[in-house]
Structures are given as structure tokens and as C-alpha cells.
Image (cartoon, helix red, strand yellow):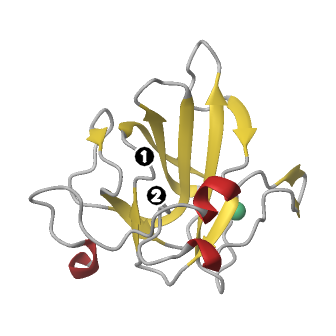
Amino acid sequence: MIPVFGVRGADLRNSFDEGRPLHLHEAIDIAAPVGTPVVAAVDGRLVKLFTSVQGGLTVYEFDLQGRYAYYYAHLDRYADGVIEGMQLKRGQLIGYVGISGNSPKGAPHLHFAIFRLGPEQHWWKGEAVNPFAALRDGETAAVPLVPGLASPALKR
Ligand SMILES: [Zn+2]
């Protein structure tokens, strides 16, 4: 699922191979206004809530098999009740688009990356995979998928 509420595959641009200062981007930037709901791209487990200089407020999710890590960065804030170790359902609200970290302040977006984890399953270490093709064909997050969770659109 495309992890930003209301964004369609046709809206996305492949920014994976773009250069950034001192490194390759190796992620997809999904443009959206500050406060737009960010949802889990897949079923999995939230392994880390982390604040870094570059990524700002971030979430690391592992898929259920622990083979891939999903990284959501530059968040404005986390969703209420989000904690490390919790199970996530695809489409579940985890936070809101923001400009934290080194995000350009005039161009809010979700920085979204996928890493193939090594056998040690360190959340901070993996081999980058380009999520563009999967996102382009991904479902648009438009309805709350978790029973009891208020519509993300109403929680802004
Ligand atoms: Zn980015």
C-alpha cells in the first residue's frame, strides 16, 4: 500500500537513484502537505521509533517474516498510541507527514525506503531495495482498515 493517505501510484516519481549531498538517495519521496496521515505499507511489526539528524522523526517496521525493513522519515509526529513492538496492519495509521530532520522546509514529503535485512536483523542496517515499482502499482490508502481506529482523515 502507498504509505501516504490519498496518494495514487500515478502521482509518484522514481527518486531512488538521485544524488543527495554525500550519498545516494535510495528512497522514494512522496510529496504531501504537512499533517497528511502516514500508514503502514505492509503488515508487520513496529521495531523502532527513532529521531535522527537527517531523518528527523522516523519509524522502522519489519515485515512479518523479518526479511525487510520499512523506513518512514521526516514525520511531523507519531499517531496516538504508537509504540515500539506493536503489530501493524497494512493501512494502519502510524504518523503524519512533516518536515523534521533535513527535509526541505518548503517541500514536505514522506521519505520512504525499504531495506533487505541481514541475518542479524539490525533495524539500522540493510541493503536498499527500490520500492518504486511496488508503490506505483500499490493501493491508495483511502479508508481505515483497522477496526476501531478512527478514520485517519478525521484525526488530522
Ligand atoms: Zn528522501
In the visual, does 18 lie left or right of 111? right
Classify 10 Å Cα crowding around label 1: few (below 14), some (14-19), many (20 and above).
some
Q: Which one is in front, 75 or 151?
A: 151
Q: Position of residue 81 (x, y in %)?
A: 20, 52
Q: Is residue 74 visible?
A: yes
Few, some or many residues within 10 Å of mark 2 (<14, 14–19, 20+): many
- 125 sits left or right of 153 in the view: right
Asked whether disc 2 touches disc 1, contact meaning CB atoms under 8 Å apart, the reply is yes
Q: Position of residue 108 (x, y in %)?
A: 59, 79
The mark found on residue 102 in the picture is none
> Residue pushed farthest left?
148
- Residue 54 in view of the camera: no
Residue beneath the point at 41% across and 77% down: 36
Is residue 80 depicted above or below 119 in this figure?
A: below
Residue underneath mark 2? 1
Q: Which residue is mark 1?
A: 42
Q: Residue at x 35, y 50 (%)?
A: 90
Q: Position of residue 119 (x, y in %)?
A: 61, 12
Residue located at (47% from left, 69% from top): 4
Q: Left or right of 49: which side holds 101?
A: right
Residue positioned 55% across, 36% down in the render: 69
- The amino acid beneath tag 2 is Met
